[in-house]
Image: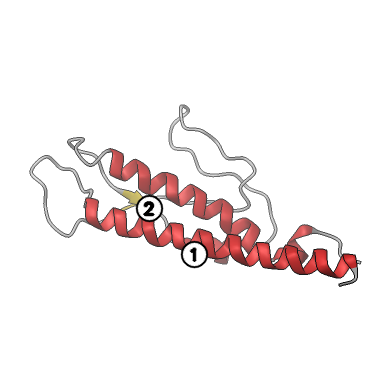
Amino acid sequence: MISTIDSLFGVHEKGLIFRSKRAEVLASNMANADTPGYKARDFDFKSVLNQLDGSQTSLRRTNANHVGFDKSPATINLSYRIPNSASLDGNTVDVNAEQARYAQNALDYQTSVRFLNGKISSYLSALRGE
């Protein structure tokens, strides 16, 4: 008998959570492309997935006003992106690069959703005896 959802869907369920969080970070970067002094941030998706060991921890908050994601299964350490070219106002956002990262993240999210849909469909077929 299957004991948990984790054993059914593997890392994809948690991967969707992290892909969603990364989309928020990348969208924030793009929204602040014209903000003087804004520093683009991101996190390494692969390293976050490698941290998953089944323990429940929360995201590290650097300010009391930041929203906490207590249901996240691992810690996300946001890092500042090193810019390819210097900006006079101190902003490190490269809009074209952020859009490309956002698009790739969206494709990866859709891939996980389709994988999960396939798994769910096969489980439903098995339950129906098809």
Residue 126 drawn above or below residue 75: below
Q: Residue at x 81, y 63 (%)?
A: 124
Looking at the image, which is closer to me, 106 or 11? 106
Q: Quadrant of residue 51?
A: bottom right
The location of residue 104, given as percent across then percent down, is 39, 62
Q: Residues within 10 Å of mark 2 (few under 14, many from 20)?
A: many
The location of residue 38, given as percent across then percent down, is 24, 39
Colouring method of the image: secondary structure
Q: Which mark is residue 98?
A: none
Kind of element beneath mark 2: strand
In the image: residue 128, left or right of residue 7: right
Residue 91 drawn above or below residue 112: above
Q: Tell me which label, 1 or 2, sits earlier in the chain.
A: 2
Q: Quadrant of the C terminus?
A: bottom right
Q: Residue at x 23, y 48 (%)?
A: 93
Q: Which residue is mark 1?
A: 47
Kind of element beneath mark 1: helix
Q: Which residue is mark 2?
A: 42
In the image: residue 99, left or right of residue 70: left
> Which amino acid, by three-letter code, is at mark 1?
Ser
Q: Is residue 81 visible?
A: no
